[in-house]
Image (spheres, rainbow, N blue to C red):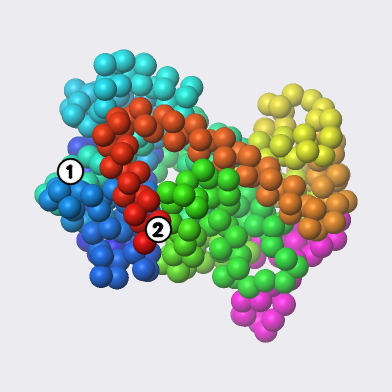
Amino acid sequence: MLPSEPEVLHTVLASFPPVQHAFAYGSGVFKQPGLYDGHPEASAEGSAAAADAVASGSGDRPMLDFIFAVDDPVAWHTENLRRHAHHYSFLRHLGPAGMTAVAEKLGAGVYFNTLVPWAPHQLIKYGVVRLSALQADLLHWTTLYCAGRLHKPVATLTCHPGVAAAQEANLRSALRAALLLLPPRFDTLDLLHAICAISYSGDVRMGLAEDSRKVHRIVQGSEAGLRQLYSPLLGEAQQRWGALVAAGEAGGDAWAADDSTAAVGTLVAGLPAHVLQRLAAALGVQVVGAEQQQQQQQQQQRCSGTAAAGLPAWQQPPGLGAVAAALAARPAAQRARLLRHAIHAIVGASSRRQAVSGVLTAGVGKSLRYGVAKLRKAWR
C-alpha cells in the first residue's frame, strides 16, 4: 500500500452515508511499477484520467478507487445526493431509483461516480453496489466485475461477515480456474499471473483503452500480497483437492498439476455456478434440477473448502457432476479453451454493459476525459 493511504482512505469513507462493506483498490492504493517512475501523477488503475486532472491543475496524485456495498442502494443514493449532489451526472434528475435501475438493469450492477475532486490535488472514484449482488458475484461469478477486483489485494475499510465468507469462496474459485488454465508444470508467479488475468479475459477495454501490461504490473507490485492471499489455498489444493504437487525442492516455487480425471473433476465441480452453466451449454450437458439447488450446493462446498459428503464432487449428480465429468474427460488443451471461453463470455458481457452505463453515470464530459487519458496511458 502506498504511504499514508490508510488514513486518507478512512477519511474519505467517513464522509459518505454508512455502508455495509467497503474496500479501496487499484494502483492509487497499491503501487504498480512502471506507472509511478517519473510520472506519479498518472498512475491510477482504472483512473488514468487523473493525468488530465493534473494538466488542468485539479489533481496531482493517483485517483483513489472505492467500492461501497450497501443493503439498499436507493436509500443510500438518497442520502448521498443530499450530501454530495455535485458528484453525480445528469442522471441525478432520474432520482435514486432511476440511477439504481441504470446500474442494475443496464450496467453490471455498480453505479460509479468518477473524477470527483475530494481534497486539494486528490481525485476519487467510487462505485455503489447492492450487498446481495456483491455476494452473488463472489460466490457465482455472475459478472466477475467485483469478484475479479477481489482476486487481487484490496484495502478493506469496512467488513461485512457475509462478504468475507463469500470472498474466501471467490479466492478458491480463482485458484481452481487458474489451475485448470495453466500447463502441467508452472511456478508460483505463473499461477499469480493466471489468477490476475481472469478478470481481464474478454474485457472490452483490453488492448484498446487499457494498459496491456496491467496484469504484469499488478503481479509485480502486489506479489507479496498475492502470495499472502493464495499460499494457504495452495496447501488446500495439495491436501484436500489432490490437484497439486510440489515439483521442486521443499519450499520451492515449482508445481505440477495432477491431470487425473478425478483431480480435474474435483477442480471443475468447485467452479462458480455461472461458469458451470456456460460450460454446460458448450458441452451440450443437460443440467438437471433447479439452479437454486445447484448454487446452494456450491456455496456449501466453497465456504467449507470441501466437497459434500458421499460421492466425489466430480461424480455428484445432477448437473454439477455431469458438467465436471464431461469436462474432465476432455484433453487438457480443450478443457482450458472451453473454460477460457466461458470466462471470456462472462467478463465480456459485463464489461460491455458497464462501459455503456459508465458513459451515463459519468456524463459525456467526464467520459471523454476518462477515455482519452486511458488511451494515453495504454499507448505510451
Judge by depth and name the residue closer to the eye, 202 or 274. 202
Sequence-wise, the earlier of marks 1 and 2 is 1
- Magenta run includes residue 327: no
Q: Secondary structure at mark 1?
A: strand
Residue type of the residue flagged with mark 1: Trp
Residue 28 rendering spot, x and y as whole percentages: 31, 55
The residue beneath circle 1 is 118
Q: Which residue appears at 45% of the width and 34% of the height? A: 354
At label 1, counting other C-alpha atoms closer than 10 Å, the crowd grade (few under 14, some 14-19, many 20 or more) is: some
The residue beneath circle 2 is 379
Residue 311 rendering spot, x and y as whole percentages: 85, 45
Judge by depth and name the residue closer to the eye, 163 or 102. 102
Query: Can you tell which mark lies on residue 147?
Result: none
At label 2, counting other C-alpha atoms closer than 10 Å, the crowd grade (few under 14, some 14-19, many 20 or more) is: few
Q: CA distance from mark 1 to mark 2?
A: 28 Å
CB contact under 8 Å: marks 1 and 2: no
* Residue farthest along the bottom direction in this orientation: 249
Q: Which residue appears at 25% of the width and 63% of the height? A: 40
Residue type of the residue flagged with mark 2: Trp
Residue 31 rendering spot, x and y as whole percentages: 35, 64
Where on the picture, by quarter, is residue 114? Answer: top left
Is residue 155 visible in the rendered image? The answer is no
- Magenta run includes residue 252: yes
Q: Which residue appears at 30% of the width and 66% of the height? A: 36
Please report the bounds of the magenta region as a residue range: 235-261
Q: For the image shown, how many numbered marks are present on the structure?
A: 2
- In which quadrant will I find the C terminus? bottom left
Q: Which residue appears at 45% of the width and 69% of the height? A: 220
Q: Report the side of 310 relative to 182 (left or right).
A: right
Q: Is residue 28 above or below residue 350?
A: below
Is residue 253 visible in the rendered image? The answer is yes
